[in-house]
Image: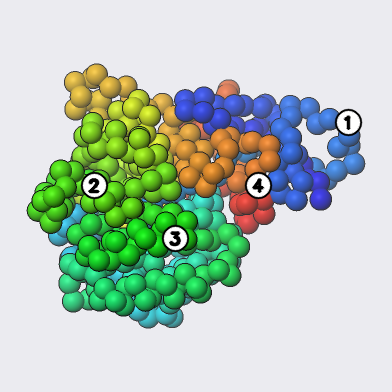
Amino acid sequence: MTSIVKGILVSAPSLGKLEVHTPGCLVLEDGVITGVFDELPERYAGASVEDFGDCLITQSFTDLHLHGPQYPMLGTGMDLPLLEWLNAYTFPTEARFADEQYAREQYRALAAELIRNGTTRVCMFSSLHRKATLILMEELEAAGVTGYVGKVNMDRNGGESLQETTEESMRQTLRWLDECGQFAHIKPILTPRFTPSCTDELMAFLGKLAAERNLPVQSHLSENQAEQAWVCRLYPDCEQYWQTYAKYGLWNQRTVMAHCVFSDERERRAMQEAGVTAVHCADSNLNLCSGVAPVRALLNEGVKVALGSDIAGGDTVSMFDVTASTIRASKARRILDDWKTDALSVAEGWYLATSAGAAFFRAESGFAVGEPLHAMVLDDAALTPLPTAEERLARAVCRRQEGAVRAVWSAGRRVL
Ligand code: GUN
Ligand code: FE
């Protein structure tokens, strides 16, 4: 069925560039973009048009790193650095997801909040619980979120509350993979929590599984200096953190690594050469006093970079806020680098929050013909009028606007 959506179109076809149609029309065939026009061609005269007037129609967000079972602690526990924070707050919070009823309630609320905030693609950690992971996938699917979810693997250093045996971790992972084929829009991703959480045997198993079943992989990398030092102690045979993943086959173009705050030139080159995506989580990196990631260096060196909220190290689900934090963090990096690196522009931040993340799902950048629509309508009519779409987008990023997201499409379906 043909449908047409009309408004002020703003999209990010490449880093630092915005494409604007004032106004423009998206022509959809069963939710897939078949044309982007300033003026609707005559041949569509009879088709149904939804006209959003002066509202902005933008791409929706991709959150390439967040933890579903940390949603209950969102906005709390911001007083400890990573390793202490994991033991004091995070592991006990995640342990509660053994309770399926609790998981259902939390995950339903999270899924709804993602859609309300215009996030339609995710790459998400669940907890180690197989059943709760399936519940998370169900709730995201029902709300209209698309992307990847991973049952977390952790067979060491989880403390009393949150740990599996190696054998259990493998068995539950295989069973989870067998059970999650039912979802149309939510797919599995292998998820060794981070090197200190997984024994060699488990890492080797996951690497083999990734290769055999052609599965993507997500984990954490060089987030914090104490973590980095710990990994070096655990693997004296590896010179760098990334090698502890690479040696088990967990390092390729289907890998996303969150943080990369302390990835030096050599580690960044390893990412670029393997096609690994770095997920920058600016909110989390400041909340946990981790550091300020070298985003400009990553970009300049040709590493794929996308953004993550990393809730609940990050304190907000809103990718508007995460984009603003990303830009702010790039300014902190500029100061730390003696003004030698350039800060990110809004157009760059917007690209990282939308098209760059979508690329991990093999989607083309911007509003590309042939892609199912992932978009949102931003209504800023309550605020002071601004002359250009670019300025309005910048304000949408930098100023919180409750209720500004008026409509959302995910994989071609209207979900809000
Ligand atoms: N490293 C290992 N686990 C976690 C986690 O849950 N959050 C963050 N930010 N880093 C981690
Ligand atoms: Fe994380």
Query: Where's the C terminus, which quadrant?
Result: bottom right
Q: How crowded is mark 2: few (under 14 residues within 10 Å), some or many (20 or more)?
A: some
Q: Does the residue labelled 1 lie within 8 Å of ligand 2?
A: no
The secondary element bearing badge 1 is classed as: helix
For label 1, the residue is 42
For label 2, the residue is 243
Identify which amino acid the numbered label 3 is placed on: Glu
Instruction: State which quadrant residue 262 falls in.
Output: top left
The secondary element bearing badge 4 is classed as: loop
Q: Is there a contact, CB below 8 Å, between mark 1 and mark 2?
A: no
Distance from disc 3 to disc 1, alpha carbons, whole Å, reads 50 Å
Distance from disc 1 to disc 2, alpha carbons, whole Å, reads 58 Å
Q: Quick one: label 3 or label 1, which is nearer the N terminus? A: 1
Distance from disc 4 to disc 3, alpha carbons, whole Å, reads 29 Å
Q: Which of marks 4 and 2 is in front?
A: 2
Residue drawn at 60 percent across, 62 percent down = 184
Q: Nearer the viewer, mark 4 or mark 3?
A: 3
Residue drawn at 90 percent across, 41 percent down = 46
Q: Position of residue 169 (x, y in %)?
A: 32, 73
The colour scheme applied to this rendered structure is: rainbow
Identify which amino acid the numbered label 1 is placed on: Glu
The answer, for residue 334, to whether it is visible in the render is: yes
Specify whether 39 is left or right of 170. Answer: right
Q: Quick one: label 4 or label 1, which is nearer the N terminus? A: 1
Q: Nearer the viewer, mark 3 or mark 1?
A: 3
For label 4, the residue is 372
The secondary element bearing badge 3 is classed as: helix
